[in-house]
Each structure stands twice: as structure tokens, then as C-alpha cells.
Image (cartoon, helix red, strand yellow):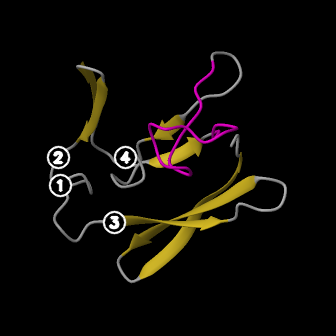
Amino acid sequence: MALLSGLDVIERTPHTNTVASVAPGLDATVWYGRADLKIKNPYNQAVAIDCHQDGEQLVMSIKGDTVTKLAVNNKGPELRRRQIGPAGDKTLIVEVYLKENAGEHMVSRDRYRLTR
């Protein structure tokens, strides 16, 4: 969500194992005192992060004005995931790329232990 809205991911720690609620490479561990997700607003305008529970789902959105990328049209940035593995040591490597305009760059490369 942060990457697609143009926010900068300053700090992110993936889970050790894959989790069912989010695709590998798009997760973040938040563990008080040990791991955090830190994002930075590069815009001159404020953004709002809205988070609420809808039944058993957590719903999050980032809202901004028309100056930011948050006024997204159908041709906004996209994320592409590339999975490598599982390797012989039962690990999965996942690379995440941000595609924007004509270019693309890697934003993360994570290693997960598979428990199966």
C-alpha cells in the first residue's frame, strides 16, 4: 500500500515464515522493540492513513490530495513479485519490483522458511 501510493519505505522486516494473510514479499513484521515498519511521506502535503476492522478483516487506506500520486488513475504504479524456489533447504526467495512509468526497480528481496 505504501509503495503504490508513493510513500518511501524506510524500514521493513519480513516475517521468517510465510503467512496466510498476505503474499510473501508484501508482508511486514511489527514486533515491539525488535522490528517495525517505517514509512516516510515525501510529499509537501499531508497524507492520512486510515485503518479499521471490518469483521475479521483489517482494512487500510492512504489518502492524499491531487498533488500526490495518491490521486491514482488506472495507470498508476504496479508491484511485480518474482518467486525463486523453494530451494533444497526449504526456503523461498521472493523479489518485489515497483513498476512505474517505463521503468522498474527492485524494492525488496526476502527469504522465507517453509514449514511444510
Q: Main secondary structure of the magenta part?
A: loop
Mark 3 or mark 2: whose residue is earlier in sequence: 2
Real-space CA distance between mark 4 and mark 2, rounded to the nearest whole angstrom: 16 Å
Residue hosting label 4 = 1
Residue hosting label 3 = 77
Mark 4 or mark 2: whose residue is earlier in sequence: 4
Identify residue type, mark 4: Met
- Does dot 3 land on a helix, a strand or a loop? loop
Mark 4 or mark 1: whose residue is earlier in sequence: 4
**From this viewpoint, which residue is outermost toward the front?**
116
In the image, residue 33 above or below residue 41: above
Numbered mark located on residue 44 in the image: none
Mark 1 or mark 3: whose residue is earlier in sequence: 1
Residue hosting label 1 = 71
Real-space CA distance between mark 1 and mark 3, rounded to the nearest whole angstrom: 12 Å
Residue at 26% in and 21% down: 52
**From this viewpoint, which residue is outermost toward the top?**
32
Mark 4 nearby-residue class (10 Å; few <14, some 14–19, many ≥20): few
Numbered mark located on residue 65 in the image: 2
Identify residue type, mark 2: Asp
Identify residue type, mark 1: Ala
Q: Which residues are magenta?
A: 13-31
Left or right: residue 55 compared with residue 88: left
Along the line of sight, the residue nearer the viewer: 1 or 9: 1
Q: Is residue 103 magenta?
A: no
Q: Nearer the viewer, mark 1 or mark 3?
A: 3
